[in-house]
Amino acid sequence: MDRQTQFSISRRAWLTALAGATASAKPVFGAIKPDITLRFSHVVAEETPKGLAANRFKVLVEQRSGGRIGVQVYPNAQLYGDHDEMQALQLGAVDLVAPSLSKFGRIGLPEFELFDLPFLFDDLNAVRRITLGPLGQKLLQGLPRQGLVGLGFFDNGFKQMSASRPLLEPKDFVGLRMRVQASRVIAAQMRALGARPVTLAFSETRRALATGVVDGTENPVSNFWTQSMHEVQSDLSLTEHGYLGYAVVTNQRFWHHLQATDRALINQALQEALTFANQIADAQNDQALQALRQAGTTRIHRLNTGQRARLRQAVQPVQHQLASRIGPRWMKDLEQALRQA
Ligand code: LMR
């Protein structure tokens, strides 16, 4: 890691202490100074499945520990963003992050990009056969390779496409510069549609759309709405072409240094917060779509069966193209897990 990143992370670690008081959601236990404070950084807004899950986790931990364990949540990439949150976690400058599953490939875990394969999952139940099943556990077992511990998965939901024109047929994507997460699978998906993938941090996306650096992007509606992307995108096409989900990750050294009782309390609170997130994810996206309709700034297009089938066919080759990156063993396990009813 270059000195500049090391410097910015250690400077930020200092800022953490300073910024502690400004963290979102006031301590549940008023004036009690916690013995341990967990720093939980994420890149999205609070009114999203991830934002609400992080705050629920905070309340549960602080209540159950009687204020002895505090949680400071830093939403909206206030502290760390897509570029440095994983490194900050590996350095111990933060204790918990919940990146999208699309962001694990670039830290040496390309198997996580299986979640990005377009049109792979018919619904969230199919996703949960992976995330809440043995294959999900196997994926999390790879994290210690990077000095991390995976604590669990949760959903946001299915992604839609936005641009300054309707995206109903593969030809509509040709020549567009589309913002994507740092995933080779998603980049290949955009290329298969004739678009140019542009990898950008989430926090930079709205500005890049507003300034014309990119023409469009993909995300579930809860992210689209809470980042006010509707103010700079005239058309949202409900493609439901891919899944966006998360894994909560902590630093291995930090986790193993916790007392066993504290680790159990924190983990129990987290599992409940993740279940809560999966319960509200759909509703959060529906509410955002409703709000978008009411705002009336963006035309909303539903694809008919034929249009969705043509889109699906156009990106079908991606699965074969990226199978070697994800890994033949993972692809085989995935197929098996999805086939199990
Ligand atoms: C994105 O970068 O588009 C998303 O992963 C952001 C998020 O964490 O939901």
Image: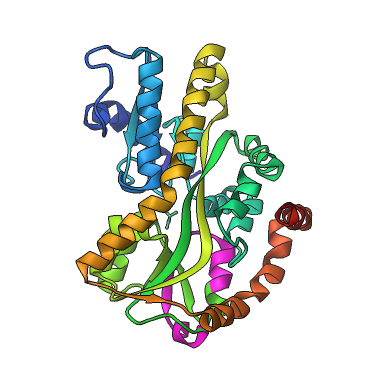
- Residue 255 in magenta stretch: no
Residue at 22% x, 65% y is: 294
Does any portion of residue 259 appear in the rendered image?
no
Q: Which of the 4 image quadrants contains residue 296? A: bottom left
Q: Which of the 4 image quadrants contains residue 142? A: top right
Out of 299 and 32, give the one closest to the viewer.
299
Does residue 180 lie above or below 272 as drawn?
below
Residue at 52% x, 82% y is: 307
Q: How many discs appear?
A: 0
Residue at 49% x, 50% y is: 100
Outermost residue toward the bottom? 171
Residue at 65% x, 75% y is: 316
Colour scheme employed for the rendering of this structure: rainbow
Out of 144 and 57, give the one closest to the viewer.
57
Q: Is residue 116 left or right of residue 24?
A: right
Does residue 31 lie above or below 144 as drawn?
above
The quarter of the rendering in which ligand 1 is drawn is bottom left
- Residue 185 in magenta stretch: yes
Out of 34 and 109, give the one closest to the viewer.
34
Question: What's drawn in magenta, residue-wise?
Answer: 170-189
The image shows residue 110 at horizontal and vertical percentages of: 64, 54
The image shows residue 194 at horizontal and vertical percentages of: 52, 82
Q: Is residue 76 left or right of residue 138?
A: left
The image shows residue 262 at horizontal and vertical percentages of: 49, 15
Does any portion of residue 221 appear in the rendered image?
yes
